[in-house]
């Protein structure tokens, strides 16, 4: 299992939300590059970067940050945050991102989404399953799309996509433990996808529990910044990607 440490960015600062609520934002006294370098030194291979501001102002705000991290580290970057059109994807890929997480667009504008997949390749796309009660939420987790997780997985698989990032909104940023039952259910439903679990991880124990599931990766964020998890201990569990995976 691969572990992907996260950096969420708001107003050019490292930040974390609780349950996606911008009224519950906490900033950290560090820089994205400084954290990225620590992750690389610890042995991690991938980095999950979220542009929190993009969900609010519809603009990609952290392209310089992506370039800086790609220029000064050897980390692979998975980017997420408010993707709305193909020009934004082009900008993000040119800045150096290796994969792009797409959420709302894959629900609200399937024609545009399908053109993006065809143009850039399914291997570059991670579909976000931001869920509450197994329904997908969109628009920065503010609106229930009414689309069940499993229905959306089937649709995306039909386009050749097989990497999905599932975040349980009710647990994100709470560090109260992940929704292992949800991830088990998804993997039982579709055994051939690569599932990335996110939300609620607060201890090494939580990570070890997830490592027993047949999932591709987990994203860990707030627990690292709050010193609930030591990154060296975390790296020992799964810092490198299996060579059989792209």
Image: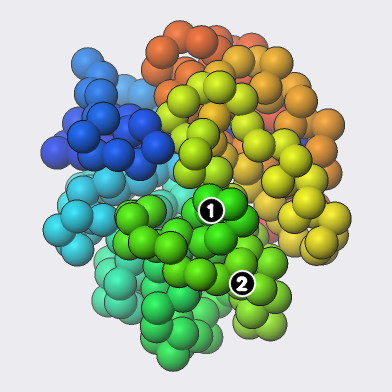
Residue pictured at 63% horizontal, 63% vertical:
149
User: Is residue 6 depicted above or below 111 in this figure?
Assistant: above
Identify the image quadrant of the C terminus.
bottom right
Q: Is residue 124 left or right of residue 12?
A: right
The numbered disc on residue 152 is 2
Please identify the quadrant where the N terminus is shown.
Answer: top right
Q: Is residue 123 visible?
A: no
Q: Quadrant of residue 209?
A: top right
Q: Residue at x 55, y 77 (%)?
A: 121
**Residue in the picture at 69% in, 82% down:** 158
Indicate which disc residue 131 carries. Answer: 1
Q: How is the image coloured?
A: rainbow
Disc 2 secondary structure class: helix
Side of 72 where 125 appears, left or right:
right
Labelled disc at residue 46? none
Camera sees residue 232: yes
Q: Earlier in the sequence, mark 2 or mark 1?
A: 1
The residue shown at (25%, 30%) is 25
Counting from the top left corner in percent of width and height, residue 108 is at 40, 78
Q: What secondary structure is marked by label 1?
A: strand
Q: Residues within 10 Å of mark 1 (few under 14, many from 20)?
A: many
Occupied quadrant, residue 144: bottom left
Question: What is the C-alpha distance between the residues marked 2 and 1?
Answer: 11 Å
In this rendering, the answer to whether 128 lies above or below 196 is: below
Asked if residue 243 is positioned above or below residue 194 in the image, the reply reads: above
Q: Is residue 51 left or right of residue 12?
A: right
Label 2 neighbour load within 10 Å: few <14, some 14-19, many 20+ = some
Residue 55 in the image: x percent, y percent?
26, 56
State whether residue 28 is above or below residue 57. Answer: above
| Image location of residue 87, percent across then percent down | 27, 76
């Amino acid at each position: 299992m691969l572990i992907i440490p996260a950096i969420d960015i708001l107003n050019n600062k490292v930040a974390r939300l609780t349950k996606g609520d911008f009224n519950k934002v906490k900033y950290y006294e560090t820089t994205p590059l400084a954290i990225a370098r620590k992750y690389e030194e610890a042995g991690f291979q991938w980095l999950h970067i979220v542009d929190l501001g993009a969900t609010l102002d519809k603009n990609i705000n952290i392209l310089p940050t992506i370039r800086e991290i790609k220029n000064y580290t050897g980390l692979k970057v998975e980017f997420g945050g408010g993707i709305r059109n193909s020009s934004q994807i082009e900008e993000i890929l040119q800045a150096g991102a290796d994969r792009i997480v797409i959420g709302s667009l894959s629900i609200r504008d399937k024609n545009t989404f399908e053109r993006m997949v065809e143009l850039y390749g399914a291997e570059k796309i991670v579909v976000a399953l931001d869920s509450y009660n197994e329904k997908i939420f969109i628009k920065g987790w503010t609106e229930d799309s009414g689309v069940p997780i499993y229905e959306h997985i089937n649709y995306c698989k039909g386009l050749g996509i097989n990497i999905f990032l599932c975040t349980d909104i009710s647990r994100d940023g709470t560090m109260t433990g992940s929704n292992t039952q949800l991830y088990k259910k998804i993997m039982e439903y579709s055994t051939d996808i690569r599932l990335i679990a996110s939300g609620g991880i607060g201890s090494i124990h939580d990570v070890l529990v997830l490592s027993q599931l047949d999932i591709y990766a987990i994203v860990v964020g707030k627990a690292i910044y709050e010193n609930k998890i030591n990154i060296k201990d975390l790296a020992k569990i799964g810092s490198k990607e299996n060579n059989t995976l792209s």
